[in-house]
Amino acid sequence: MDNLGQKICWMLLGAAISAPLTWWAVTPTSTPLLEYAELVSPRAQQPTVSLSNTLSDGEISDNSQDRSELTALQQQVQQLQGELAQLEAQADSASESSAQHQQVTSSGNIHRQLADIFRTEERDPVWADELELQLGDFLYTSDLSTYFAYASYGCKRHVCQLSFVPRSQGVDAMQWQRLNDSLFNSPWITHFKVSSAQQTAQGMQVHLSTKSIRQLSTEY
């Protein structure tokens, strides 16, 4: 019993002595490791952050340059489109002017041809009398007798000639246009294949033909 008690006492005494030694052995080594870990960790992260910032700045610079180049190209495209539109407008204007000139020249030639034929051709009394009755009523049926009067009108064989004059100096361009529209919308206008109207110093002269210019040229 005494031996057993002595063993227990020696064991407790050994445990008490070994515990401080173990704490003293562990504590000096653990603290520097923690300090080293805390000191080294920020340094390891700094290069990564700096590299990331450098790449971001480069990418931003490249993107800005690309946007500038794209903007410059868009401006060039808009400028070229504007120049193209101007050229097209000039070409259309030149073409329209040429077409109008040709139309006026052609109309003038037709008017002279019909006037020459009307002077030289013989009169067909049956056909001419019937049309002259309709022509004589035209200004009254179209409510234009207040503004215009006939200087002369008549028909021959294929061609009719009408000369209108204003009744006063107050007749304006709108009334002349109304006369022209009413004339070429009359029911009897369907008898004619060719028509020509020309403004004169006194008024307006109109020629109407039942035959085409080609048919007239072969006959006269």
Image: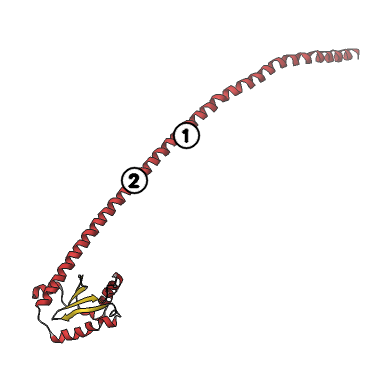
Q: Which amino acid does label 2 sit on?
A: Gln
Secondary structure, mark 1, is helix
- For label 1, the residue is 60
Image quadrant where one finds the C terminus: bottom left
Left or right: where 70 falls relative to 8:
left
10 Å crowding of disc 1: few (<14), some (14-19), many (20+)? few
Left or right: where 67 falls relative to 96:
right
Q: What residue type is labelled 1?
A: Ile
Q: Which of 1 and 122 is in front in this view?
A: 122
Task: Tell me, for residue 79, which label it has, or none.
Answer: 2
Q: Residue 175 appears in which quarter of the rendering? A: bottom left
Determine whether 18 is above or below 103 in the image.
above
What residue is at 21 percent from the left and 85 percent from the top? 133
Residue that sits furthest to the right in the current view: 1
Q: Residue 144 appears in which quarter of the rendering? A: bottom left
Estimate the x, y position of residue 95 in percent, counting from the top left: 23, 57
Cα gap from disc 2 to disc 1, whole angstroms: 29 Å
Estimate the x, y position of residue 205 in percent, counting from the top left: 19, 74
